[in-house]
Image (cartoon, rainbow, N blue to C red):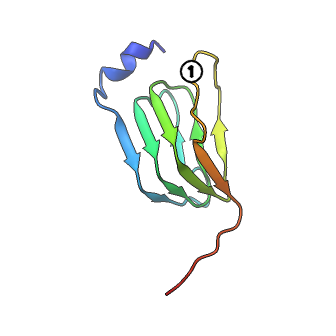
Amino acid sequence: MEPSLATLDAIEPIVMRRNRFECDHGWDVDLDDGASNYVIEENLKLSGALKLREGVHRVVRNNILVNGSFHPHVWSRTRTPLPAPFVHPVREVAFLVL
């Protein structure tokens, strides 16, 4: 995909911020088939985690992944490098109930 074409329909980035996601039979967030021009930050993903595949202009940072992980499918060297830390994997979570 030519990176400049990604902003023809989504002129401004699609922002996914401060959400709670949980999918027991798939991915919590799945950007597939050229989904481009996204900012995904400060989200809580509780089960299936995050999958990115073919796409450009995507920023993923400061997400909490519980019982899941990051899955970069079909990642190429021409993609923008992901900043660190961009995901925080968690295997066990303790909740304080007041």
Residue 25's place in the image compared with 77, above or below, is: below
Front residue of 89/5: it is 89
Q: Residue furthest front?
A: 84
Residue 63's place in the image compared with 9, above or below, is: below
Q: Position of residue 48 (x, y in %)?
A: 62, 54
Front residue of 65/34: it is 65
Q: Is residue 29 visible?
A: yes
Q: 10 Å neighbourhood of mark 1: few (<14), some, or many (≥20)? A: few
Q: Is residue 28 visible?
A: no
Q: Find disc 1 in the rendering and name its residue.
A: 79
Residue 35's place in the image compared with 96, above or below, is: above
Quarter of the figure with residue 53? top right
Q: Position of residue 44 (x, y in %)?
A: 52, 58
Front residue of 20/1: it is 20
Q: Residue furthest bottom?
A: 98
Quarter of the figure with residue 78? top right
**Which residue does the image show at 58% across and 61% down from the upper left?**
46
Residue 45 as seen in the image, left or right of residue 71: left
For label 1, the SS is loop
**Which residue does the image show at 64% across and 25% down from the upper left?**
75
The amino acid marked with disc number 1 is Arg
**Which residue does the image show at 56% across and 58% down from the upper left?**
23
Q: Position of residue 49 (x, y in %)?
A: 60, 51
Q: Residue furthest right?
A: 91
How many numbered circles are shown?
1
Q: Position of residue 21 (x, y in %)?
A: 50, 58
**Which residue does the image show at 37% across and 16% down from the upper left?**
5
